[in-house]
Amino acid sequence: MTLILLGVAIAVLLLIRVPVAFAFLGPSLVYMLFEGQASGTSLRQVTNAVQSFPLLAVPLFVFLGTLANHAGLADRLFRFAMAALAKIRGNLGYVTVGASVGFSWMSGSAVADAAALGKVQIPAMLRNGYTRRFATGLSAASSLIAPVMPPSIPAVIYAGLAAASTGALFAASVVPALLMAVGLCLVVWILVRRNPQLTAGRFDRQELLASTKGVLLPAVTPVIILGGILGGLFTPTEAAAVAVFWVLLISLVQRSLSWKGFLAAVRETVITTGAIMLIVASAALLGHIMALERLPQLLTETLLGITESPMVFLLLVALLMLILGTVIDATAILVLVVPILLPIALQYQIDPIVLGVVLILSLMIGLLTPPVGTALFVTASVSNTRVGEVFKGALPFAMPAVIVLLLVIIFPNALMFFPEVLGL
């Protein structure tokens, strides 16, 4: 009964738009008080949740993304993609996807991608005859590649919670992210064919050469991150630190980052990291309460009684994440469900890496669904468009992510190919 009241209290707070961290923390502290738990126990659960070396990579990857944004790397990627694909009909659609893939190797966040690239991509598409619905929908949907493609911030958080190999999770995530990009390009091709007014541009060799020079040094960043981690040279935290140093160095050499921009990047990093860690801490206390109430054991018994199929279990997990992702922040959901679902997945002999990819893909689709839909709100903000209009535009572009999620669930062993080849 107490757990039900706790759930109702949290639901009410979320409905009245109380921030997720406080919606979790307040009722959890009241529960601990009424159950006679010492205040020191609550404090210990909260502090232990964020005292994790793997989680140290989170602020570094956030800093890397904000630095790349303020140093103009997103603009350079977009310019290069425009020059390279100039002669293709409907090229701006493919440029948007390509730029998102390139920027995802540095940001690891859908919000950073939508904010940095959306303000460049959307006006360019609107000027060249694309509808507002197409431009905003594609920009929002393509931003989902960033939290799936390494270095993914949700992957770092999951790996820390599940005590799984971050490198293995990164290696397993590359193919799903690339499949999402291919699927988006296919949807763009279908929609462009229905709009004959979207013509090709002119190829300019000088522009291609100039834009290529602008992306050569930034292109080394994903080599440092992925090559260092997958090659066993760095831990994810060390790779993030080296990548930050590299971006700072090339920004100084190319004089693309002002002191004002650097301070803005630091400020955004502090705010974003603080929000993430507060959610992690508050969700950890709620997770401790669920453990006290034996919720993981009850859920395990229920699921094992319903089905013995790993595929059905993963489908149920994906459906649950899609529902929760419409109302709760992805970080909070990960902290809550990983300690509960991981032991159940092991009962079904599902690799923790597979579970991680399924969770991340499912939750990232939730970024395109209201009422939370962070990618929708960010895209709407940078383009001065109503959220409902962005959502309608994003619907056809969300299908590739859904299809990739189903493929991962149906063929989970395929995900382990690269981690096994790399010995991770």
Image (cartoon, grey):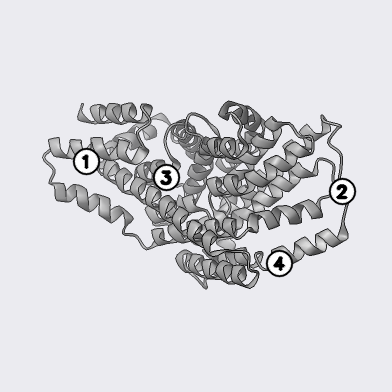
22 relative position to 54: left or right: left
Residue on which the image places disc 1: 292
Instruction: Identify the amino acid type marked 1.
Output: Leu
Total residue callouts: 4
* Residue at disc 1, secondary structure: helix
Give me the residue at 55% from left, 46% from top. 110
- Among the two numbered marks 1 and 2 on one chain, the one whose residue lies closer to the N terminus: 2
In front: label 1 or label 4: 4
In front: label 2 or label 3: 2
Residue on which the image places disc 3: 331
Along the line of sight, the residue nearer the viewer: 45 or 340: 45
Observer able to see residue 174 = yes
Query: Label 2 near label 1: C-beta < 8 Å?
Result: no
Query: Label 4 near label 1: C-beta < 8 Å?
Result: no
Residue on which the image places disc 4: 216
Give me the residue at 48% from left, 64% from top. 236
In front: label 3 or label 1: 3
